[in-house]
Amino acid sequence: MIYTITGSRDFAESEYKRVIMPTMKLLVENPRVSCIYFGGARGVDTKALLAALNFRKDPTLKFVVVVPYTVEDQPPETHEVTRLADEVVELNFRGKMQYIPALRKRNQYMVDRADKLLALSNGDKQSGTWQAIRMAHKQDKPVQIVDIRVK
């Protein structure tokens, strides 16, 4: 089974230990999961990848980070963690589209490849997280929403 992780950029730091770590532990330890896609942005994307890396014991479980442009175009605080993934997909939309449409295309890329979407959301229905949720629903893919608190 292939998962895509989507999540809020802003959340309370306490949510890493309270929600993100235990959620990723359960996912990573599920023997049916073969691959997990992450968005490579600051916030949940990077924190979820960090937690997943911490809990991975199965070397065949693959972690893929997808970025709309290149890793270097992402926030500097994400670079080191992103490079720890098994694969980084740089969609390289620079010069082809503005940032927000590029993020939508990135989300669509990840949802298209997933069997299930895991959304760690602060409840902002205008966010890219909820955009990915709507994309998954349109494809009749299961969505698990886990609430995280805002700062």
Image: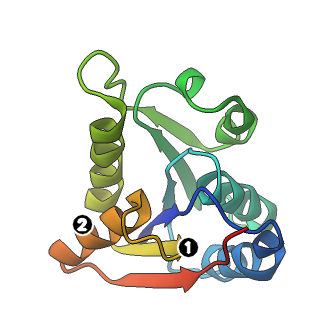
Q: Is residue 74 left or right of residue 114?
A: right
Give, as a three-letter code, the residue at label 2.
Met
**Residue at left 16%, top 73%?**
138
Give, as a three-letter code, the residue at label 1.
Leu
Q: Are marks 1 and 2 in contact (CB under 8 Å)?
A: no
Is residue 139 visible to the viewer in this orientation of the structure?
A: no
Label number found at residue 47: none
At mark 1, the secondary structure is: strand
Q: Is residue 29 left or right of residue 5?
A: right
Is residue 135 visible to the viewer in this orientation of the structure?
A: yes
Looking at the rendered structure, the number of numbered marks drawn on it comes to 2
View extreme (top): residue: 95
| Residue 133 percent across, percent down from the top left | 33, 72
Give the mark, 1 or 2, whose residue is nearer the N terminus.
1
Residue assigned mark 1:
120
Where, by quadrant of the figure, is residue 103 drawn?
top left
Q: Is residue 63 left or right of residue 110?
A: right
**Residue at left 66%, top 80%?**
23
At mark 2, the secondary structure is: helix
- Mark 1, Cα crowd under 10 Å, few <14 / some 14-19 / many 20+, is many
Residue assigned mark 2:
135
- Distance between the alpha carbons at the discs numbered 1 and 2: 15 Å
In this rendering, is residue 99 above or below 129? above
**Residue at left 58%, top 83%?**
147
Q: Is residue 90 left or right of residue 142?
A: right
| Residue 146 percent across, percent down from the top left | 55, 83
Q: Quadrant of the C terminus?
A: bottom right
Where, by quadrant of the figure, is residue 135 drawn?
bottom left
